[in-house]
Each structure stands twice: as structure tokens, then as C-alpha cells.
Image (cartoon, rainbow, N blue to C red):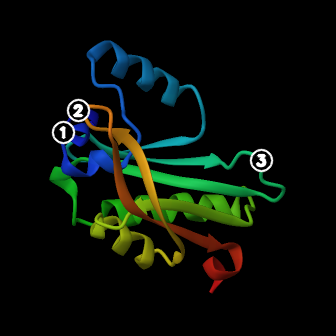
Amino acid sequence: MIVQYQASELAAYDQPWPTSEEEIKGITQWFASGDNYLAVCLKEPSQFIGFVALNPEAGEDSQVYNIGYIFDANFHGKGYATEACREVLCHAFEQIHTDKVVTGTAAVNRASCRLLERLGFQKIGESIGSLRTTADGKPIEFLGYTYALTREEWGR
């Protein structure tokens, strides 16, 4: 799934992920060693289709978490990301008692923008960002949106 994602046009707007078999094994072990990553699997047939991450924001005085997700392209548009993210948000607000969950996405990633809006996130900012460079070292710039969802908004 990560190799598939790295080959997609949207990967240019995200942090690079490892793609070698050894690197993927290592990151999989790292994911499994903590509580910040939720594997999303189908029951029948048993199949891994994506993950949702919930990580504390560094340097925040209040409890603020960042949510992120990647799903196998073969399962886009079927409601799995909505269901999984909704459960992670429920955990964040009702179990961890976080004050706010934030995230960001590239403006061109309309599916991600729609998902966040469907979950109740509000767009709170826009900025030009760059997380990768071209083969000749030039930054790949893009318009990014910042989204936030507070505990009060979630409770409505």
C-alpha cells in the first residue's frame, strides 16, 4: 500500500515514505510498537486496507492531536476512511479527552478535503508548503489547507 501511495500523484504533497522491503518491515514494526497507529482491515476477506494515525502535537500547552491517514486506492470511495477516522476521533475526544484535533492536506487532494469536511473539520488556514524536491533539487510547492476540529464541535 505504501509503495502504491508513493507512486501516486498525491505523494508529491506528503512526507516521503520508505519503499524498500526492509524499510517497510521496519516501519511496520515501529507502527505496531505503539498506540498511535490504527490498522484498518476488512473482516471478510481479512485484508489490510489502510491506517489512521493519531499523534500528539509537539509543544502544545493544551491537548492537541494530529490525525493522518492513508488508504489503499482500491478502497477509496467506499466509506472505510470515514468510518475509521470517525472511530479514531471518538477515541480522541471521549477517551483521551483531547481539546482539539488538527490536520493538513494539499488543496488538490479534493477527496481528503471532502473527508475532513464530512467529519466536521473546519478549514482554519492556507499556506504554500513543500515537503519534497524535484530530481534537480527544486522544492515542489503546493497550496496546503490546515483543518481543525474541537471537542465542542465534535459534541454537536
Q: Residue furthest left?
A: 74
Which residue is rendered at x = 44% and y = 24% of the image?
Answer: 27
Amino acid residing under circle 2: Val
Q: Where residue 5 sits: x, y (%)?
A: 25, 42
Q: Residues within 10 Å of mark 2 (few under 14, many from 20)?
A: few
Residue topped by disc 1? 7
Q: Quadrant of the N terminus?
A: top left
- Quick check: can you spot residue 86? yes
Q: CA distance from mark 3 to mark 1?
A: 33 Å
Amino acid residing under circle 3: Gly
Q: Residue furthest bottom?
A: 156
Secondary structure under the numbered disc 3 in the rendered image: loop
Residue topped by disc 2? 3
Secondary structure under the numbered disc 2 in the rendered image: helix
Residue topped by disc 3? 59
Relative to residue 128, is residue 41 drawn left or right?
left
Q: Given contact means CB atoms under 8 Å apart, are the residues at marks 2 and 1 in contact?
A: yes
Dot 3 or dot 1: first in sequence order is 1
Q: Where residue 139 sits: x, y (%)?
A: 36, 43
Q: Given contact means CB atoms under 8 Å apart, are the residues at marks 3 and 2 in contact?
A: no
Q: Where residue 7 sits: x, y (%)?
A: 18, 39
* Front in this rendered view, residue 12 or 28: 12
* Front in this rendered view, residue 59 or 27: 59
Which residue is rendered at x = 35% and y = 58% of the image?
Answer: 142
Q: CA distance from mark 2 to mark 1?
A: 6 Å
In the rendered image, which quarter is residue 39 located in?
Answer: top left
Q: Residues within 10 Å of mark 1 (few under 14, many from 20)?
A: few
Relative to residue 62, is residue 29 drawn left or right?
left
